[in-house]
Structure formats: structure tokens, C-alpha cells
Image: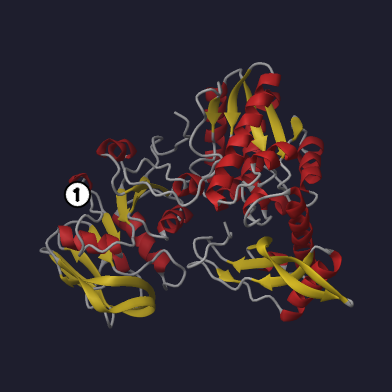
């Protein structure tokens, strides 16, 4: 089995059943922040998988559907048969109410945003809280009639039944979202459920996890050699450090310069890992191969798949040069798996493909090692810090696996990558100079598929347009555009237009997530 999993090692697990909410990953992360392990599975997962995990409690996520319609997701009967605590959130509450005999209606007054919740009756779920709190609502339907054997525990102005609990069983449901930072004491509510109601032990510990993963790697790899594709990003860097600690010289890293990296990145990666960390790193100059495969390709999903397949082909070729390689290691992390619908759903929805998700092609005669596959990004950074990776590397802004390939809208060419690389470098350089880099969560430039007329000196310039994007976020599930100072933006724009003659105009993206995503493709 490729997946490194702690769920079977006598560690208490909270199962998050996913009904399609944009906040599902955030629920699981909030649970883990309380040092309790969580795992996400789709609502239609098979019963055997649930039994295998043996959760101590289950959280039902929100979702975009309406239980008032036919053939929308429902809670499997096997969940109720487990006789363990259940917490329904938003859609999770609505389908819980509908399936247990209550009534759900489409409300004339929909709630999106802040609302004041009044706690009507005492409950273990709200223990230690004020009677009134601000909560974050996002719903069109609401529970009109309580199911049999349920009590009302909280209300809002437009949702009289905003929270309910079973009279005798540990089944709870809330209409609002405790996992988002907008809800006051949301962490208290989740802690009350996972610790006080489910009785979970807080034994999800990073130091113990590192030791466990090292032993797992040693047991899996044995005396064989491992090939790792090293990108220089946080995920592959932590994977490299963990593998190096576990198997030392049996690890060979291949750094693929695909021509889609940031300015100076190839040189920095080689210096950090080969010179400073003494890893065995081989550099593969493959820019021409990637650009040839991407010629005339404009669809972002197709670009991602082509880049992923090209990576695999190059790794395969490098593995053939290196004798006795038996394993391929990858820096796959949990959000990659979830977004690529790698969680065994019968109705899987792909948000975007990740080049390191989905296993290996049959012709590649290597087994897979993915020691970070069940970790979120903040957990990966935490692990990297404990493994001694420089903090400046761990705190770099996220960079997509396909690199500049998905920051160039439309066809990718060598000329476009150079223009974008230079513009991006100016933007990041100035953010650092102005002391703004650490105040934004992610910042980058985008090559737009349009040209614009400009005037430089006395000459007309009909040239490319560069978009700048900077966001602030805690969890990358939601994000707001960064309100960078106008003077700063003016300075960056002037530098880009003056120093890059192929650019005539710079624009700034003021879209938040949702509805926009952070990356453009």
C-alpha cells in the first residue's frame, strides 16, 4: 500500500465525511490543530473503508446541494450503525435532520455571512461559551421541524433551528461553520466535540510522527535505492530531508529544470541541497523537452497533465541510468490527493490534477514512496522545521507543481516564460525590499493572453500585459486580496514596464477566494 497512514496505529481518528463543501479540508485541519488525527472521505465511501479506519467520531461537512431535491447526497446507514458521536455542519445538519424524520425547507431568507447565534439550551457542544456568539453562515435551506428525539439548542434571527442535539445519543448538528475564523469560539465548539464528546486522545504529535515515518521508510525501502524528484518547493524539500534521515546515501535526488521555474531557482536548489545539505542531487536540464510537449496547448488541465507525464518520463529515464533503483519518492501532500479526487469516491469531482497524484504508469517499474501523503501544508512545514530545513525555504510562498506553466494563460513558450520570470522576480524582490513579503501569504505575476498599447518615451509600444496577484490567508481555503500600498504597486509597475521592453501594461488582481481561486489556472 502506497499510503503512509497513522490511522491504524492506535491513534484516535475523527472521520470527516465530505459532502462537497469548500471548507471540508479546513474542518480536518482544525481537528489536527488540536493534536487529534483526522481523515477526509467522500460521503459515498464504501463501508469497509470506514470500518478499517474505525473512527471515534464523525463530522459531516457542508455542501452545495439541497436535501429538498431528489438524488442528492445522504448519510450512509452504516454511519448510524457505528453508534459513535456525529456532528453535522450546514448541509450535514440538513441531511441529518431529513433522514431522521425532521423537515428541511428552502428558505426565503438565505444567510451568507455573519449572524448572531443565541444558545437556547445548555449542551456539551457549547460548554464554556457565552450565550450569544457571532457565527459564519452559508446556506439557503434550513431545518423547519426538529427530528423525533431531538432538542433545540441554538437559534439565529433567520434560522430558528440553528443547532440541535439528540436527547439520548451523542448526535449534534449546527447550521453554521465553526471551522472558519469568522465564527467566534469555533475552535471551542470543535474541541468540545472531538475531545469532550468523542473522548479523543490528543496524540497526533509531530516528533513522534517523524520517528514513525523514518521507521516506516526504513521498513518499506530496506536495502534498496530511492529516486526522488526534487523541485525545491516545501513538499519535496521536506520529503528529501526525511528520506535522507531515514536511508542516507541510498537516496538519489533528481532536480528537473523544466524551464518553468522562478528566476535563479535552479541555482539556489542545487546549492541548498547538494552543497549545504550534502544530498546526492543530479540536475536534469529538460526545458526543451517540456516546451516541446506544451507547444500549441492552451487548456490548463491539459497543461497540468502534460507536465506531470513529462516529469514521470524524465524520472523513468533517470532511473534507467541509475542502476538498482527500486522506489520513486514524491512530495504528495493531503490537499493534492483530495483535490485530485484520490479519495475513492464513487462520484469524484476533480478540482485540478496534480502531477504527483494517481500512482505510476504500468510501464514504470518502480514502487511509490509518499511519506507526506496524509499531511497538510502547515504540518509539512512543522516537520521540515524539526528536520532542520532553513526557515527561509520553509516560509517561501507556495509555488504550483507545474510552475510558470499555469501562470502563463494560453500556450507556453520560451519567450513568455522569460518575460514572466523577470516580472515575477521584480515583484518578489520589491515585496522583500519594502518589508511586505511576510505580510502576504502568496504573491506572483501572471502572463495574460492579451496585448495592450503603451507609450514609452515618444514611441508607441504594443506589447504584453502582466497581472500581479497577492493574497492574505490563514489556510488557503479562503483568501482575500492583499491591499498593497498604491505607491508600492506604482513602483513595481514602473519597474516592470521600464525594465521589460516586451511589457506595456501591469494590472493588479483584486479578486478574493471564493469566488476566484488563488492561481489563475
Is 228 in front, or is 174? Answer: 228
Q: Is residue 27 left or right of residue 163?
A: right
Residue where numbered disc 1 is placed: 80
Please tell me in which quadrant of the rendered image residue 107 appears. bottom left
Q: Is residue 346 left or right of residue 25?
A: left
Is 236 in front, or is 460? Answer: 460
Extreme residue in the right direction: 457
Please tell me in which quadrant of the rendered image residue 372 appears. top right
Residue 254 pos. (x, y %):
70, 32
Mark 1: few/some/many CA within 10 Å (<14, 14-19, 20+): few
Residue 463 pos. (x, y %):
76, 66
- The residue at 55%/64% (across/down) is 474
Residue 465 pos. (x, y %):
71, 67
Q: Is residue 180 above or below residue 48?
A: below
Is 289 in front, or is 336? Answer: 289
- The residue at 64%/16% (across/down) is 324
- The residue at 67%/42% (across/down) is 237
Quadrant that contains the C terminus: bottom right
Can the viewer see residue 331 in this picture? no
Residue 178 pos. (x, y %):
38, 66
Number of on-image labels: 1
Q: Is residue 30 left or right of residue 430?
A: left
Check the image and tell me how it is coloured: secondary structure
Can the viewer see residue 85 in this picture? yes
Q: Secondary structure at mark 1?
A: helix
Is 71 in front, or is 216? Answer: 71
Q: Is residue 446 left or right of residue 55?
A: right
Q: Is residue 503 above or below residue 250?
A: below
- The residue at 79%/35% (across/down) is 274
Quadrant that contains the N terminus: top left
Amino acid at each position: 500500500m502506497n499510503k503512509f497512514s497513522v490511522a491504524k496505529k492506535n491513534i484516535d481518528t475523527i472521520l470527516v465525511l465530505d459532502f462537497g463543501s469548500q471548507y471540508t479540508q479546513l474542518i480536518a485541519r482544525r481537528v489536527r490543530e488540536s493534536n487529534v488525527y483526522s481523515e477526509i472521505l467522500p460521503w459515498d465511501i464504501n463501508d469497509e473503508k470506514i470500518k478499517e479506519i474505525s473512527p471515534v467520531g464523525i463530522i459531516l461537512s457542508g455542501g452545495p446541494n439541497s436535501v429538498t431535491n431528489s438524488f442528492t447526497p445522504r448519510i450512509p446507514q452504516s454511519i448510524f450503525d457505528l453508534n459513535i458521536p456525529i456532528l453535522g455542519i450546514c448541509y450535514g445538519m440538513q441531511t441529518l435532520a431529513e433522514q431522521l424524520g425532521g423537515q428541511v425547507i428552502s428558505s426565503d431568507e438565505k444567510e451568507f455571512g455573519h449572524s448572531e447565534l443565541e444558545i437556547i439550551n445548555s449542551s456539551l457542544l457549547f460548554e464554556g461559551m457565552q450565550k450569544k456568539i457571532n457565527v459564519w453562515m452559508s446556506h439557503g435551506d434550513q431545518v423547519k421541524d426538529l427530528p423525533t428525539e431531538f432538542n433545540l439548542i441554538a437559534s439565529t434571527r433567520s434560522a430558528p433551528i440553528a443547532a440541535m442535539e439528540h436527547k439520548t445519543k451523542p448526535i449534534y448538528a449546527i447550521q453554521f461553520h465553526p471551522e472558519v475564523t469568522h465564527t467566534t469560539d469555533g475552535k471551542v465548539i470543535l474541541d468540545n466535540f472531538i475531545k469532550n464528546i468523542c473522548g479523543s486522545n490528543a496524540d497526533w504529535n509531530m516528533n513522534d510522527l517523524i520517528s514513525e515515518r523514518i521507521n516506516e521508510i526504513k521498513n518499506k525501502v530496506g536495502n534498496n535505492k530511492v529516486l526522488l524528484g526534487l523541485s525545491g518547493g516545501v513538499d519535496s524539500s521536506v520529503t528529501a530531508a526525511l528520506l535522507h534521515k531515514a536511508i542516507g546515501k541510498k537516496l538519489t535526488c533528481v532536480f528537473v529544470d523544466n524551464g518553468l521555474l522562478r528566476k535563479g531557482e535552479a541555482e539556489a536548489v542545487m546549492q541548498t541541497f547538494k552543497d549545504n545539505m550534502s544530498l546526492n542531487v543530479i540536475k536534469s536540464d529538460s526545458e526543451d523537452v517540456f516546451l516541446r510537449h506544451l507547444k500549441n496547448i492552451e487548456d490548463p488541465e491539459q497543461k497540468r497533465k502534460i507536465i506531470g507525464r513529462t516529469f514521470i518520463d524524465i524520472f523513468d529515464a533517470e532511473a534507467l541510468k541509475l542502476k538498482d533503483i527500486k522506489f520513486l519518492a514524491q512530495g504528495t501532500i493531503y490537499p493534492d490527493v483530495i483535490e485530485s479526487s484520490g479519495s475513492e469516491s464513487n462520484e469524484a469531482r476533480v478540482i485540478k490534477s496534480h502531477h504527483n497524484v494517481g500512482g505510476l504508469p504500468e510501464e514504470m517499474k518502480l514502487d511509490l514512496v509518499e511519506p507526506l501523503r496524509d499531511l497538510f501544508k502547515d504540518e509539512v512545514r512543522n516537520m521540515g522545521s524539526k528536520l532542520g530545513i532553513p526557515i527561509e525555504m520553509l516560509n517561501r510562498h507556495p509555488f504550483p507543481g507545474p510552475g510558470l506553466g499555469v501562470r502563463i494563460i494560453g500556450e507556453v513558450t520560451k519567450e513568455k516564460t522569460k518575460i514572466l520570470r523577470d516580472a515575477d522576480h521584480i515583484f518578489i524582490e520589491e515585496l522583500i525590499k519594502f518589508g511586505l513579503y511576510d505580510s502576504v501569504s502568496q504573491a506572483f505575476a501572471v502572463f495574460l493572453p492579451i496585448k495592450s498599447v503603451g507609450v514609452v518615451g515618444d514611441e508607441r509600444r504594443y506589447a504584453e500585459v502582466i497581472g500581479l496577484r497577492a493574497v492574505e490567508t490563514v489556510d488557503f481555503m479562503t483568501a482575500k486580496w492583499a491591499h498593497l500600498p498604491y505607491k508600492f504597486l506604482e513602483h513595481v509597475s514602473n519597474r516592470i514596464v521600464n525594465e521589460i521592453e516586451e511589457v506595456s501594461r501591469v494590472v493588479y488582481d483584486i479578486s478574493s477566494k471564493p469566488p476566484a481561486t488563488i492561481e489563475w489556472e
